[in-house]
Amino acid sequence: MQRPFQFALYAVVITAITGVTSCMQLRSDWRTASREPVGLAPDPAEVREAVVQVYGARTVGAKGIFGVHTWVAVKPADADGWTVYEVIGWRLGWSDSALVVHSRAPDARWFGAAPELYVDRRGPGVDALIERIDKAAHSYPYGTEYRAWPGPNSNTFTAWIARAVPELAVDLPSTAIGKDYLGSAIFGAAPSGSGFQVSLGGVLGMAVSAVDGLEFNLLGLNFGVSPNGVKLPIVGRFGSSSVPTHGADDARPGGLVPGAVQ
């Protein structure tokens, strides 16, 4: 038991040091930071089947030490480009909604931070999932609100989509702070849309499901274990590098989904 604990502790410390260094750099040059794609998304000219991908990348500034910004990207069958759904808080400075639905490279760096691919679904049945994603996005109830902690924020939005479309089976990392925010509800589905969750305003609770594993939330910091590895604050997760890539009918987890759009 001592060795795994030491390894986890070393991972947290090293990640924190690396995160501080990276965030200090991003704080000074975020306006010119790279937004170039990193090659994780298929070229629509070559892949004609429908595809859904979910990504996350460290946020800008000191917040990036603890958290990521997440988004959902879709490409319907035979489409010539990608559509990205995301919530961007600073838009509320000039817009009445933080929700953005736009065309951009799905695997673009988030102001210099390389994105991580959480799930990739493609093939028959995915077009139907894309329709439900679009419907869920436009019914997101917190578009006029944004709080980096404990939510609602970009990760609250991605979890809202995942709960509405549980076939995606998205296992968000512990750094997706805000994914546990359920508004005024206390009980609901886990962030993946499967299993169940108990959450007090996104700052205290737990979640259990075949996708999310077992996860505890203390003041917005998540600890747990899932089929994709161990989940820790700052680190995110470690232990598995596999990305679920499969069709729409490969997983149909069930759960309590408050406000989900089916």
Image: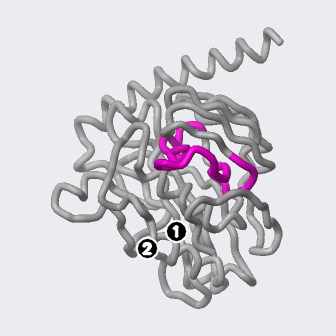
Q: Closest to the observer: 62 or 259?
A: 259
Q: Position of residue 203 (x, y in %)?
A: 50, 33
Give the residue furthest to the top. 2
What residue did someone put label 2 on?
138
Q: Position of residue 39 (x, y in %)?
A: 55, 62
Compared across the picture, whether 192 is left or right of 45 comes to right
Query: Element at badge 2?
Result: helix
Name the residue: 47% across, 49% down: 183
Which residue lies at the image location 56% right of the left edge and 85% below the top edge?
Answer: 45
Mark found first going from the N terminus, 2 or 1: 1
Q: Does residue 140 appear to the left or right of 195 in the view shown? A: left
Q: Residue at x 78, y 61 (%)?
A: 253
Sort mark 1 into few (<14), some (14-19) or many (20+) by Cα contacts within 10 Å. many
| Residues drawn in magenta | 174-196
Q: Is residue 38 magenta?
A: no
Direction left: furthest residue:
94
Q: Residue 54's image quarter?
A: bottom right
Asked if labels 1 and 2 touch by Cβ distance under 8 angstroms, the answer is: no
The residue that label 1 is drawn on is 73
Q: Quadrant of residue 221?
A: top right
Q: Position of residue 180 (x, y in %)?
A: 55, 44
